[in-house]
Image (cartoon, rainbow, N blue to C red):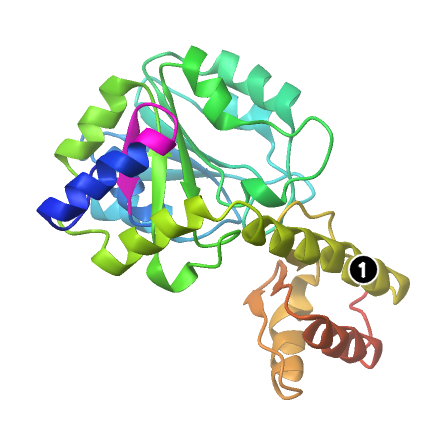
Amino acid sequence: MAGTGSARGLEKGAVLAGRLPAAVAGDQDGGGCTAGVVPAGVGAAVGLFESVRYRLDPIVARMAGAVPVEVPLAEGVHDLDPMAAAITPRTRAVFLCEPNNPTGTAVGTAELERFLDRVPGDVLVVLDEAYFEFYRSPGAPDGVALHHERPNLLVLRTFSKAYGLAGLRVGYGVAQPVIAEALRKCAVPCGVGRIAEEAALTALSVEREPFERVERIVAERERTRAALLGLGWEVLPSETNFLWLATGEASQAVAEQWERRGLLVRAFPGSGLRVTLGSPDANDLLITAAKETAPPAR
């Protein structure tokens, strides 16, 4: 465990590492590990990302002097064949989010393993599983299980989503020891604070409550998506705690209209809206706003 902020934090980190799979590297909610793996050849390293995603990783790549290469999604889902084909001798890392953020879509175990088989052994695959606990479809992959046979696989998970610790920004990476050791060497000092350490340890000791919360969110996800589909909105299947509305060029206008109604949704101009699931009352407010707004023409 790395990235803890004190001698006591290092001791706590050892305890946490003992409760998690082997070869754990401490992390500030995924971003710390990303910052550590990108600078693997400043000015020459290339990282592959999907084109519509959480935007921190390409930014960190540029800060490190690497070249981010974005591969378009196919109908909101990772297009793994073009991503594999885009790998060149200059590629040092591939970033894959499963389920994906912000579309909420997933590829499943069979497609993921087929992709991993095509990645050269000297190219690091960073598998972001921030929404792992919300994944309900048959064939959902488990990156932690996969990493035992994949020396070039780094799996990122977080306490921010299922455990409700978003404000504390604490997560972890799981990889083969050689990768974990390299991450420890370049981890940001004091990247995880004392309160976050204590909260993560407490979360691990509470077995039922976080996952009861996850089940409630999953139920609300399916109810809300069904209601929106019934109103004529195009909503992708989701394996996360949010929904993706394919609103295209109308995305910004719809987001602004809903903000006036008291709803804050994230617009990706020209692509869609990312809507986080809330309480049943908040989701009902979303459904009402969608009912009173004409769905964009497809």
Q: Residue at x 57, y 67 (%)?
A: 267
Q: Does residue 269 appear left or right of residue 228 in this picture?
A: left
Residue located beneath label 1 in the image: 223
Q: Give the quarter of the image for residue 39.
A: top left
Q: Residue 63 at x, y = what percent?
A: 22, 48
Q: Residue at x 73, y 29 (%)?
A: 138
Q: Nearer the viewer, residue 197 or 125?
A: 197
Query: Which quadrant: the C terminus?
Result: bottom right
* Residue 23 within the magenta-colored segment of the rendering: yes
Q: Residue at x 64, y 52 (%)?
A: 212
Secondary structure of the residue carrying tag 1 is helix
Q: Residue 213 at x, y = what percent?
A: 62, 56
Magenta range: 18-27
Q: Residue 284 at x, y = what percent?
A: 76, 75
Q: Nearer the viewer, residue 189 or 108?
A: 189
Q: Residue 219 at x, y = what percent?
A: 75, 55
